[in-house]
């Protein structure tokens, strides 16, 4: 705490030195900014441009998991209940060397539903998850 004299009257005026407090606050601000960058969860996804997302008429070996707006899950045209989705993906991918799946969410599905489906797929051993563009109504 700094002390200064008020002049000729002999009064003592006490002032708080705030410089050390500001230094501590700036250091804490920098620490919190760095910690925020480190603990941020990251989901790596690849979204192809809409122009390149053309459907081919020939049968391909790609697996597409559709998340319909009514809450159903469809893998290459075959519907599966959510409880059996993990087992179905294990059945498909246990024999495949390439672990790649495309997730096609409906336009009205919630973000949490999409992330939950990706978690189920990753838990079943799929290494690469691609998201298809959401088609506008």
Image: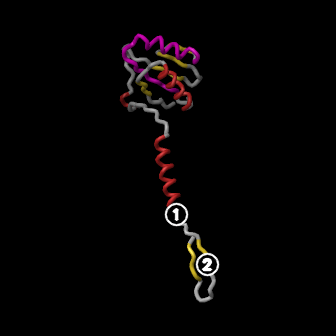
Q: Which residue is mark 2?
A: 13
Compared with 84, 17 (above or below) is: below
Q: Residue furthest bottom?
A: 8
Q: What colour-coding does the image apply?
A: secondary structure
| Residue 26 x, y percent position in the rendering | 49, 57
117 and 17: which is toward the camera: 17
Q: Marks 1 and 2: in contact by CB < 8 Å?
A: no
Residue at image coords 51%, 25%: 119
Residue at image coords 48%, 14%: 90
SS state under label 1:
helix
Membership of 86 in magenta stretch:
yes
| Residue 35 x, y percent position in the rendering | 49, 45
105 and 10: which is toward the camera: 10
The residue carrying pointer 1 sits among few (fewer than 14), some (14 to 19) or many (20 or more) residues within 10 Å by Cα, namely few
Q: Is residue 31 left or right of residue 52?
A: right
Compared with 47, 90 (above or below) is: above
Compared with 110, 127 (above or below) is: above
Q: How many marks?
A: 2
Residue at image coords 49%, 55%: 27
The residue carrying pointer 2 sits among few (fewer than 14), some (14 to 19) or many (20 or more) residues within 10 Å by Cα, namely few
| Residue 58 x, y percent position in the rendering | 36, 14
Membership of 38 in magenta stretch:
no
Q: Quadrant of the N terminus?
A: bottom right
SS state under label 2:
strand
| Residue 5 x, y percent position in the rendering | 58, 82
Query: What are the residue bounds of the magenta stretch?
Result: 82-106
Determine which of the numbered discs, if any, sits on residue 97 in the image.
none
| C-alpha span from label 2 to label 1 | 20 Å
Query: Going from the N terminus, do you reach mark 2 or mark 1 first?
Result: 2
Compared with 136, 2 (above or below) is: below
Q: Which residue is mark 1?
A: 20
């Amino acid at each position: 705490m700094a002390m200064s004299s008020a002049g000729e009257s002999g009064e003592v005026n006490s002032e708080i030195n705030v410089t050390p407090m500001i230094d501590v606050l700036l250091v804490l601000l920098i620490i919190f900014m760095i910690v925020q960058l480190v603990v941020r969860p990251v989901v790596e996804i690849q979204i192809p441009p809409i122009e390149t997302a053309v459907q081919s008429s020939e049968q391909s070996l790609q697996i597409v998991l559709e998340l319909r707006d009514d809450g159903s899950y469809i893998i290459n045209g075959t519907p599966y209940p959510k409880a059996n989705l993990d087992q179905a993906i294990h059945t498909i991918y246990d024999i495949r060397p390439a672990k790649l799946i495309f997730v096609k969410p409906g336009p009205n599905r919630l973000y949490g539903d999409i992330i939950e489906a990706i978690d189920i797929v990753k838990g079943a051993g799929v290494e690469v998850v691609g998201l298809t563009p959401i088609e506008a109504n």
